Amino acid sequence: MEIENVEKAIVKDSTRVLTPKEYEKLKIALSADYNCICDVLVHTGMRMPEVIKFSQHPEWYDARRRCIELPTVAIRKKKTVYKTRQVNLTLDGCKAVEHFSKMMKDNLKIPTRQSMIGVLSRAAISAGLPDGDTGICPKMFRKTLVSWLMQTYPEKMFKIASNMGHTLAVMQINYTNLSFAPEDTVDIKKFLKGWGDL
């Protein structure tokens, strides 16, 4: 019996985990405004309410240290051990955050979660992603980043957990046994270049 080598969506707990190639295809199907928002989401791993709060406080970004310092007021999740959080960034992550801040000054509007789901779903189908819009939602960018970080830097689990605001138990249960194709792993390492040096 011959096994088909067909691309399938990676979906964990009803949420999609993108590959870098899928992310690039998705971006082509999105407007410049959505590209800007999605870039910030995938490079920071922040939750949507955290991005909204950060959009009102660009001073939380520290370019010299390549990070965003999220104070207690930004951490909207009620059940968390982290009352504040430092979000580490690659150089490309810094560019995404700086572009986002510039676009906010130019009146970029952050859509509601429901609007974003609709736009992302249509873009996923238009882009021809495997399994269409299965698991497509704003939360996927956060889940994608933490999955990529664990694929690339498993020895830095504690740092990744604190960066994302997760406990080690959550990391072990959800992110230590996720497989990517070898070519996707190469692309992930390129995307995250420099994060491990922080």
Image (spheres, rainbow, N blue to C red):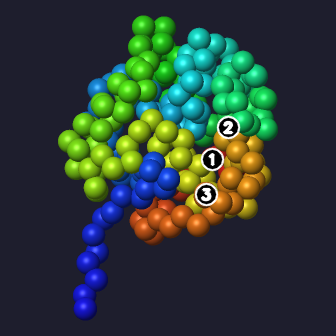
What label does residue 43 carry, if any? none
Rate crowding at label 1 as few (under 14), some (14 to 19) or many (20 or more) other CA atoms within 10 Å: few
Q: Spatial distance from mark 2 to mark 3, Cα to Cα?
A: 21 Å
- What amino acid does circle 3 point to? Asn
Quarter of the image for residue 33 reads top left
Q: Spatial distance from mark 3 to mark 1, Cα to Cα?
A: 24 Å
Give percent across and percent down for residue 135.
Answer: 39, 48
- Residue at horizontal 60 percent and vertical 19 percent from the top: 54
| Left or right relative to 51: residue 16 | left
Residue 134 shows in this picture: yes
Q: Which residue is mark 2?
A: 88
- What amino acid does circle 1 point to? Gly
Q: Earlier in the sequence, mark 1 or mark 2?
A: 2
Closer to the eye: label 1 or 2: 2
Q: Earlier in the sequence, mark 2 or mark 3?
A: 2
Tell me: residue 140, above or below residue 117.
below
Q: Earlier in the sequence, mark 3 or mark 1?
A: 3
Closer to the eye: label 3 or 1: 3
| Left or right relative to 184: residue 91 | right
Name of the residue lying farthest toward the bottom: 1
Q: Quadrant of the C terminus?
A: top right
Q: Nearer the viewer, residue 122 or 127?
A: 122
Residue 93 shows in this picture: no
Give percent across and percent down for residue 192.
Answer: 56, 49
Quarter of the image for residue 125 reads top left
Name the element at disc 2. Answer: strand
What label does residue 174 carry, if any? 3
| Left or right relative to 81: residue 39 | left
What label does residue 194 carry, if any? 1
